[in-house]
Image (cartoon, grey):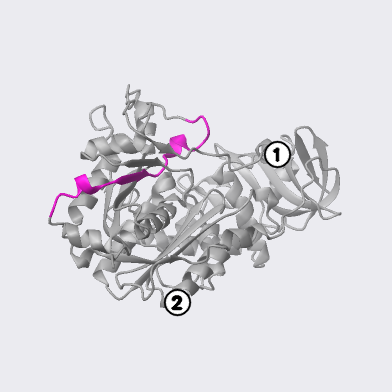
Amino acid sequence: MANRTPILVASGQYVFRDEVTAETAMSPLDIAAKAAKVAIDSAAAQTDLIPHIDTIAFVRGFVDSVPGGKGPFGGSNNVPRSLAKRIGANPQRAIYGREGGHSPQRFVNEFAEKIAAGEMEFGLIAGAEATGIMKQAGRAGLALDWSETVEGDLDDRGCHWLFTRHEVAHGITFPTQVYPLLEHAWRARHKLSVAEHRELASRLFSKFSDVAASNPYSQFPQARSAEFLNTVSDDNYWVAHPHTKWMVAQDAVNQGAALLMCSVDKALALGIPKSQWVYLHSYADVDDGFVSSRPDLAVSESMKLTLNSVLSAAGKSIADIDVMDIYSCFPIAVLAACEAMGLDWNTDEALTVTGGLPFFGGAGNNYSTHAIASLTDQLRQAQSSFGLVTANGGFLSKQSVGLYSALPPETPCKNADTSLQAKFDSLPVAELAEEANGIGVVETYTLVYKRGKPSLGIVIGRLDDGCRFLANTAADDEAAFAILQGDEEVIGRRVEVAHKAPQNIVRFV
């Protein structure tokens, strides 16, 4: 019988840290091609792999991740085929993925299914970001042109809004304005003060920065102490309460990563040594709803379902996992994942193989391609170990998880539970009062800063009848700003809310 067991046979990474000039300003596609060539070379095959690539999936770039968005210097009409042209490939299928940091792991899961079903033989997953180059080139006034037109079929899966019009009206849109809402809700659920939570987050992320400091592919390879992270300074300024600069994913990166996947039979035919093989043992995907619809903002039910199902399907507990990368765009992403799988977030065990999105670099939707590349490289050196990757998109909105090992699985690789999405969809949702008037209590909150000064207060609360409301503070409500940026507990406080189209305006009573 044919052995169609899917395996990852190679990975490649690339980082650009040089001075940006008209000659050195690499496009995201140039960076992705560098990483893809590293992956192809590292496979150590006995034949040329490029003619065998029948599918290329490109992780959607950040500049294309909002409907109608585009980069300042143009781009390709067919991103995966532009990558194919750079490496000399001619794939049958070219895929440009959806928005979200879950995308790399979800592509691995999809490729595994297609390889097992005989629908694909040899696939390349790649992505890259050059936001740092874009920003520096813009400041320097460089006239760059990254536009190109390439012929060929394209499966462009498009991008979709991650928020409702009502959420947009209240500033619940950018990650730096949404994750703080989830962070404060989690903090209060665990009965931590503002100061206690910042100490916890600072200790947690200091360990991440230690890993990034020794990673040759880090964009910001510098260890940062817990004391530094817990101190507001010119280099660690407020972004949105409770997050300062180095508590959030850093997007000014120039990084690319690539993965190669095929079946066991294909690897044997191509002469790829078994020392390169890493197996996907189990995987799962679940998509959450809009933030305003979630009944408990302090808990990620999608994380619980995916993580526990993946471990259970492989007959493992978190204690059996030797190496992992927990998505780390903000502290809450790590803390919620740890809670979901019963892992002590104070552990001395490394929770990242890269150094995390604030320190290794927040390589857009493509970060987890780097995580999978780093993790599988480690597993090739520790053949009996197991590794776990959690990939998160949106606002804890989309979860994709994979469990890996160089040891072959006892049973074929499988989706942990194909009914997970249906199980999630059956959970209750919050009832929302879009035109809110009356008295209520604060469920969570944040204060957004602009150039070091408070600019927008966001409050999510519950009216006395139990309905949720979204609200902003009035632009001139200095008293509210003082309350939101203080160390005293805000969650649970009584407020008055009044609808003033298109927003609800909240006042502390």
Secondary structure under badge 2? loop
Which residue is found at the position 59% from the left and 64% from the top? 196
Vertical comparison of 236 with 195: above or below:
above
Crowding near pointer 2: few (<14 within 10 Å), some, many (20+)?
Answer: some
In this view, 411 is above or below 496: below
Residue 227 falls within the magenta-colored stretch: no
Note whether residue 496 is visible: yes
Residue beneath the point at 32% across and 24% down: 145
In the rendered structure, which segment of residues is drawn in magenta? Answer: 47-69
Q: Nearer the viewer, mark 1 or mark 2?
A: 2
Percent from the top left, x then y, of residue 405?
A: 33, 69
Q: Amino acid at mark 1?
A: His
Q: Which mark is residue 316?
A: 2
Compare residues 185 and 383 and report the one nearer the observer.
383
- Circle 1 packing at 10 Å, graded few (<14), some (14-19), many (20+), is some
Closer to the N terminus: mark 1 or mark 2? 1
Image quadrant containing the N terminus: bottom left
Report which residue position mark 1 lands on.
166
Percent of width and height locating residue 335: 54, 63
